[in-house]
Image (tube, rainbow, N blue to C red):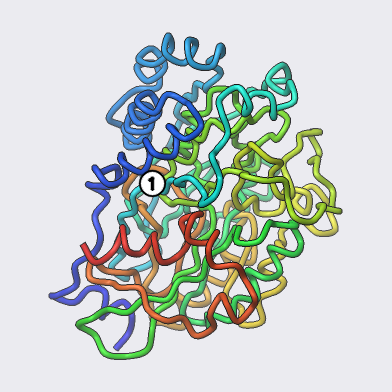
């Protein structure tokens, strides 16, 4: 039985995004903001409204007008980007015939780390090192909305779309805009955690901090081995975290990478509260090891390496490599994977690795390849496309093939930082 057949079974109950920001999320969101003294009420309201914006239920102008005065009182600035929807042609056409389910995930938040009293608002602003004076206004263009969760064709910033080879001629004329993203083949993942170990080493991440999570889960009503889900930042084309950032520290580059400018961020955690994928974390301490790589990208923005104390961090898709013609189109995690799970490249290039690989897998499956986006129906337009089994409402966390402890990873901070177990317990089995 193929994943496509299994996911489309009569008893399959796909997750819905209807309750993403529920009462449990709000409780954790307030805890995360209150510990540092920021306005948790404003954060909750802004996160909910950002979700309404990305889903098309609230306009950008209404969103900005609604919170303008509150942002100015709280932060002294309001540099949330105003995005204008890109002009579109026809709706993207699906290239996969498999049923595509969409997952539901409350936005992850971080409670106070055990033994840590948190940072005060004044301390957080001080840790920014005066970077607010160098506020960044991201050049952001909203993406067109494709079919929810479908692997679709598209151009520009079309969320998560795969471009067929037939569209290559127009793209080769230099009119195509780069959109970095991934195809993750979960059917090939063996849960070895090599991608996690390499990412931690290359970016000098502190103990217990991970930019990638490999999660194991089982479907109680289906026998068989554990399924795996590799969660990274989705680098959304229509990212809620970008919309709520008061200083423009969280922004989207012209090539689609969603990054944090460490010169501008002061750790208000609004991006963390608004992210439905739970990928953001607060830098409680300075990194354990000094990051020896290049911190500044081609624009001169500090966006790579573990975030300094008091700032926000997450997976970055290696922006320095994407600025280098010799390394462009590769990431550390992709190079570390020995099983061919991760395929990184320009999703708008029909001949990029992810596009070629996906077309090949679709052909091999006879057009019945099971694919999905995480929370694809939210309107975030994630730029990670998954091949494999989409978790259902009944999915439960289970013992992975390789444990985090086997690599010597610290467990305590993984839990505090919304690691696999807490995320699963909130999102699934409900």
Residue nearer the viewer, 118 or 262:
118
The residue carrying pointer 1 sits among few (fewer than 14), some (14 to 19) or many (20 or more) residues within 10 Å by Cα, namely: many
Is residue 164 visible in this depiction of the protein? yes
Q: Residue at x 64, y 36 (%)?
A: 310
Residues 365 and 244: in front is 244
In the depicted structure, whether residue 303 falls above or below residue 37: below
Quadrant of residue 399 within the rendered picture:
bottom left
Residue occupying image coordinates x 49% and y 85%: 401
**Which residue is drawn at the image coordinates 45% and 70% (left, top)?**
229
Residue at (72, 71) in percent of width and height: 335
Q: Could one spot residue 257 in this view of the protein?
A: no
Report x, y in % for residue 120: 56, 28
Please state which of residues 133 and 129 is positioned toward the viewer in this rendering: 129
Image position, residue 23 (x, y; %)? 24, 42
Please give left or right for residue 132 compared with residue 366 in the image: right
Residue bearing the label numbered 1? 107
Quadrant housing the N terminus: bottom left
Q: Is residue 335 above or below residue 364?
A: above
User: Which SS class for mark 1?
Assistant: loop
Point out the residue furthest to the front here: 115
Q: Is residue 242 left or right of residue 336?
A: left
Q: Which of 266 and 101 lies nearest the eye of the viewer?
A: 266
Q: Quadrant of the C terminus?
A: bottom left
């Amino acid at each position: 039985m193929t994943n496509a057949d299994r996911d489309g079974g009569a008893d399959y109950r796909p997750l819905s995004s209807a309750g993403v920001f529920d009462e449990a999320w709000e409780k954790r969101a307030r805890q995360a903001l209150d510990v540092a003294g920021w306005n948790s009420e404003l954060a909750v309201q802004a996160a909910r409204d950002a979700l309404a914006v990305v889903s098309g239920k609230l306009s950008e102008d209404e969103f900005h007008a609604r919170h303008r005065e509150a942002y100015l009182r709280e932060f002294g600035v309001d540099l949330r980007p105003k995005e204008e929807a890109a002009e579109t042609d026809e709706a993207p056409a699906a290239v996969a015939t498999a049923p595509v389910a969409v997952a539901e995930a409350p936005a992850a938040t971080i409670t106070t780390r055990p033994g840590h009293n948190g940072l005060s608002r004044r301390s957080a602003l001080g840790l920014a090192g005066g970077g607010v004076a160098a506020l960044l206004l991201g050049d952001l263009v909203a993406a067109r909305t494709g079919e929810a969760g479908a692997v679709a064709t598209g151009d520009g910033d079309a969320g998560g779309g795969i471009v067929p080879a037939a569209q290559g001629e127009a793209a080769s004329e230099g009119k195509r805009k780069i959109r970095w993203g991934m195809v993750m083949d979960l059917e090939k993942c063996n849960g070895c955690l090599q991608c996690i170990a390499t990412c931690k080493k290359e970016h000098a991440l502190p103990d217990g901090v991970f930019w990638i999570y490999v999660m194991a889960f089982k479907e109680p009503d289906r026998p068989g081995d554990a399924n795996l889900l590799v969660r990274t930042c989705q680098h959304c084309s229509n990212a809620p975290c970008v919309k709520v950032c008061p200083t423009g520290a969280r922004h989207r580059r012209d090539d689609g990478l969603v990054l944090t400018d460490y010169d501008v961020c002061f750790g208000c955690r609004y991006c963390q509260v608004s992210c439905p994928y739970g990928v953001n974390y607060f830098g409680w301490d300075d990194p354990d090891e000094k990051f020896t790589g290049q911190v500044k990208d081609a624009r001169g923005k500090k966006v790579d390496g573990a975030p300094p104390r008091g700032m926000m961090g997450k997976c970055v898709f290696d922006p320095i490599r994407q600025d280098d013609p010799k390394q462009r189109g590769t990431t550390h995690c992709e190079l570390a994977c020995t099983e061919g799970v991760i395929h990184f490249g320009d999703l708008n290039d029909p001949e990029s690795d992810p596009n070629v690989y996906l077309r090949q897998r679709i052909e091999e499956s006879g057009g019945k390849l099971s694919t999905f986006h995480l929370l694809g129906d939210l309107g975030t337009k994630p730029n990670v496309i998954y091949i494999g089994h989409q978790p259902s409402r009944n999915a439960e966390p289970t013992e992975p093939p390789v444990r985090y402890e086997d690599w010597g990873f610290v467990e305590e901070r993984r839990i505090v930082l919304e690691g696999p177990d807490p995320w699963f317990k909130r999102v699934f089995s409900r």
